[in-house]
Image (cartoon, rainbow, N blue to C red):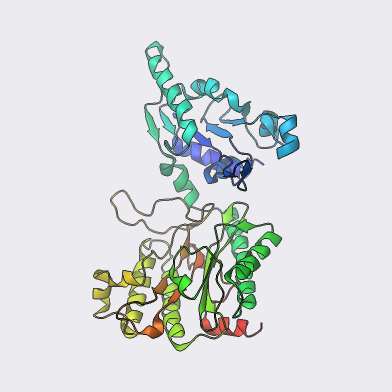
Amino acid sequence: MGMPFAERRAALMQAMGPQGVAIIPAAHEQVRSRDTHFPFRQDSDFHYLTGFPEPEAIAVLCPGRTEGEYVLFVRPRNAEREVWDGRRAGPEGAIVRYGADQAHALDAFETELPKLLAGRQTLHYTLAEHGALDGPVTRTLRQLREIARRGAQAPAAIEALEATLHEQRLIKSTGEVALMAEAARISAEAHVRAMQATRPGRNEWEIAAEIERHLLAHRMVPGYTSIVGGGDNACILHYTENNQPLRDGDLLLIDAGGELDGYTADITRTFPVNGRYSGPQRALYDVVLAANIAAIDCLRPGRSVGSPHEAASRILAEGLVDLGLCDGSVDAVIESGALRRFYMHGTGHWLGLDVHDVGRYRQADGEYRNFAPGMVMTVEPGLYIAPGSDGVDPRFHGIGIRIEDDVVVTDGAPRVLTGGVPKDAAAIEALMAQR
């Protein structure tokens, strides 16, 4: 269990420096209704550094500490609770199975914390994100400051994890990319199954079930709530009701991806319920596809993180002007905000352990940072012509289209992880013709 978690902890501690100390809590179980819980999902930061799968635990990293740099606080073994809820590692298992240098029961956290913080200059901990843990942490800091005159140094600064751990997580290792590629491959297969299962008269929830069945059959869970929106529902960006019948002549937009060992895919495809795009649907679709392809090509080392959105926006604006949905020059459509009527979101986001993964998009001066190898981003341009849009040819009303791929920045050309599901309109029609 030490690898790759030990390497990740070492990298974080090097970034913190010898006078730093970090506190990283696990997730808690969340009540779904009365005495039942949502399926547990570990906190991404905690999973990244520890691989420890249980709730409520707390990791403390103390670079250079003689007694051990990696300390875990975990739920103690409890024979009765393990009968009901499953096995626990306990402090001994935290050491033997998960590589902790030292481990304690959770109720020892506030007692042990002063020893771990004393003499450190900077505490790396994100305040106001972890609820009940803020109390013990701030009480310990106050206690150390009160006795500082007797020689015990308290951390003088508290720094959120965004500056260290989240920048580390932004650059994916070869192993992480391999996991993400597998998550993308299986998720792409699920989208193919959805295309093959779609036909007029079926319900959105039936197609959502096809996707989730395939994920579950491959030891995966949905990385987020699937969006399966037919017809007008595709114009609702985060539509999740997934309960309406699919109509002949409509498009179906599916935004869904599976999570594998914590890493998620994020794929969107938009295709005709009856297997054939209409003229207006195809016209808009080809514009979005061109924007998708141009934006992907921007994911190269040294290019601005803002460049995919700029490239996609220009192509979408050109298409809208050519089709008569926007008036004026392409520059005017973009600069006036007219494009946002039909394209109101960004072109991509970081992807990894979180579907909207961590890492800064901009530098301290407010300018976009540049791409670097190991970054993984979604590319997802779209056009959404809401029903009843004033001044728009009615043939386009109710058409919502998004095309989303997962892309790795490499030393050279971008690597698309989600090519296993077609996005060319003719290829989609050919696939659906095999139903």
Residue 103 lies, in percent from the top left, at: 63, 28
User: Which residue is depicted at the point 63% across and 85% down?
Assistant: 433
Q: Position of residue 269 (x, y in %)?
A: 52, 72
Instruction: Between residue 128 and residue 311, name the one nearer to us.
Output: 128
Task: Identify the image quadrant of the C terminus.
Answer: bottom right
**Residue occupying the point 55% across, 44% down:** 43
Quarter holding the N terminus? top right
**Farthest bottom residue?**
279
**Residue occupying the far top of the picture:** 150
Taking the image as shown, residue 197 lies to the left or right of residue 426, namely: right
Q: Is residue 295 above or below residue 165?
A: below
Tell me the quarter of the picture where residue 74 sits.
top right
Depicted 46 relative to depicted 424: above or below: above
Above or below for 119 versus 283: above
| Residue 13 visible somewhere in the drawing | yes
- The answer, for residue 153, to whether it is visible in the render is no
Q: Quadrant of residue 213?
A: bottom right
User: In the image, what residue occupies the spot 60% across and 38% down?
Assistant: 55
In this rendering, the answer to whether 198 lies above or below 53 is below
Coordinates of residue 15 in the picture (x, y in percent):
45, 39
- In the image shown, does 352 or 254 lie closer to the viewer? 254
Q: Position of residue 373 (x, y in %)?
A: 47, 58
From the viewer's side, name the closer residue of 213 and 124.
Answer: 213
**In the image, what residue occupies the spot 62% across and 72% down?**
194
